Image (cartoon, grey):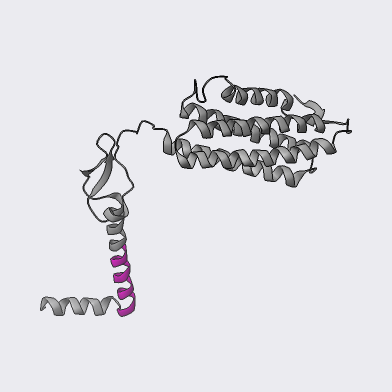
Amino acid sequence: MPYKTTVHKVAELAVKAEEAGEGYYRHLAQVVSDRKVKELCGFFAAQEVEHREQFQKIADEAKHDDAEKTFSLDVVTMMHDGINNLKRGYQSGEKAGAGLDLKGCLELALNAEEETIKLYQDIQSALEGRYNSVLFKIIHEEHNHADTIRSVMYKTVKKPQPRATYSETVLEEDKYRPSVKLADPKKGQKVIIHQGETRDSFKDYVYIVLLIILFLGLVLAMVGPQSISGAVKLILGR
């Protein structure tokens, strides 16, 4: 279903969305204790300020443009929802971080970034090249935000480790050994599990046998069967 609205309306909402994003990252910087995460949040907040200024320029330029553009997403509703979600994350009126642990804060930030990327891509498509360079830069930076948040979540939020299983992939140091080292998820140690010859070693033997057969075939082709027969008789003493 297509949705219609003006560039000015969309740009104004984007300004508010970036303001909400800036406020949320500044809030998150107060919540977390990790210094690197604090610095990242401060950096993200600064970039949101830049995005807000860029969208403000677009809103000012399109102020008297009443022509409506067609969007594939309901950008107006989605932006309102995103703004409200971010504001609820840091305007609780209570102590910073109340009601949300680090995982919850990061999940909210990641969801907001992913939704923002989809919205801005739809806006970029609807404007058909207008403000393309500005929107491309903003979308690229929002992608970087999302990727960084995923990395932080992976490193800081503990997840249950999967059970150790037999692996067909042999470590480089064990390529020619008849065992595979697997991590023990309970003890954080390495466990050596004997498996006999590995699949890679078996392939190596097959290659060697094929090379020997190929070499013998070349020798046979070069000296001829009669010469080989004479050599065999000489060796056997016949």
- Residue 182 position within the rendered picture, expressed as x and y whole percent measured from the top left: 27, 43
* Residue at x 27% of width, y 50% of height: 198
Q: What is the quadrant of residue 1 in the picture?
A: top right
- Residue 49 position within the rendered picture, expressed as x and y whole percent measured from the top left: 67, 39
Q: What is the quadrant of residue 189 in the picture?
A: top left
Tell me if residue 86 comes above or below residue 150 in the rendering.
above
* Residue at x 39% of width, y 32% of height: 158
- For the residue pair 58 and 73, the one nearer the viewer reads as 58
The answer to whether residue 40 is left or right of residue 183 is: right
Tell me if residue 146 comes above or below residue 99 in the rendering.
below
The answer to whether residue 114 is left or right of residue 154 is: right
- Residue 209 position within the rendered picture, expressed as x and y whole percent measured from the top left: 28, 62
- For the residue pair 186 and 27, the one nearer the viewer reads as 27
- Residue 170 position within the rendered picture, expressed as x and y whole percent measured from the top left: 31, 50
Point out the image quarter for the C terminus.
Answer: bottom left
Callout count: 0
- For the residue pair 210 and 151, the one nearer the viewer reads as 151
* Residue at x 30% of width, y 79% of height: 223
- For the residue pair 182 and 220, the one nearer the viewer reads as 182
Verify whether residue 104 appears in magenta: no
| Range covered by the magenta-colored residues | 210-223
What main secondary structure does the magenta stretch of the protein show?
A: helix
* Residue at x 30% of width, y 78% of height: 224
Verify whether residue 213 appears in magenta: yes
Q: What is the quadrant of residue 208 in the picture?
A: bottom left
